[in-house]
Image: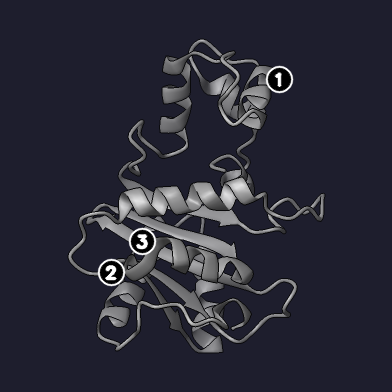
Amino acid sequence: MLIHAQRHRGVTIKSVGEAAEPPVAGPNLSVFIKSSGESRNVKAERLEQMLLMLGVLRDGLLTPGLHRWDITRHTDESTSRGVPRREVDTLIDLLDENSKGMDKPQCVCLTWSGGKPDDAVAFVLLRPTPITSLIARIDRSEVEALGIALGERFVVRHVTDGEGAELQSVWHLNDHEWIVGRKIEQFLKSTEATSVSPAIASEGANL
């Protein structure tokens, strides 16, 4: 999931494998990923190196800094494939691990009415520490699944089309990460000040 989620900035199986020390052959890493870790052809220390490069520690916690993920069916524009279920499940696991122990919901999903049903997206925001932020773009059809899995730690907030357009623009800012981090903080604070039910409505996936 972590490689797929960062393809928009040029991350590939090959580039991740080559960045390890010593390098891991792309085919070996590909086999490991496709086997969901059952294949033992990549050493544990290499896996830790690659996870760190992708922004996640061995225990599943996010590294300090800004994390910008795209987990939509249109991430790889060369194909029309859907997002594999295991990638959504991995996102849920990471959100779960990084939102534990919070005294208030800090995992917020922002949706809006714009977009065609087939390509409508939502954004998940998380700020587990003052120096760690995540903005993840997901298919809107996955909102309900995340809400069911994360329960009260996952808040859904419906924003205006203008705010949705702002989120899309912010997500694409590559050279000014401080602006992205500030916007994430602003949306989270405004959600705290808004009365939003943590429960997911049954029609949440169709918002």
Name the one closer to the observer, 43 or 185. Answer: 43
Name the one closer to the observer, 204 or 138. Answer: 204
Residue at point 36%, 30% (across, down): 58
Residue at point 41%, 48% (across, down): 94
Q: CA distance from mark 3 to mark 2?
A: 9 Å
The numbered mark at residue 116 is: none
Quickly name the residue at label 3: 126
In this image, 183 relative to 171: left or right? left
Residue 37 versus residue 12 in the image, above or below? above
Q: CA distance from mark 1 to mark 2?
A: 40 Å
> Which of the image's four quarters has the N terminus?
top right
Residue 7 versus residue 13 in the image, above or below? below
The numbered mark at residue 27 is: 1
Which colouring convention does the figure follow?
Answer: one colour
At which x and y percent is residue 188?
32, 73
> Which mark lies nearer to you, 1 or 2?
2
Extreme-right residue of the structure = 79
Label 3 close to label 2 by CB (< 8 Å): no
Of callouts 1 and 2, the N-terminal one:
1
Name the one closer to the observer, 37 or 137. Answer: 37
Is disc 2 placed on a helix, strand or loop?
loop
What is the crowding at mark 2: few (fewer than 14 residues within 10 Å), some, or many (at least 20)?
some
Quickly name the residue at label 2: 105
Q: Amino acid at mark 2?
A: Pro
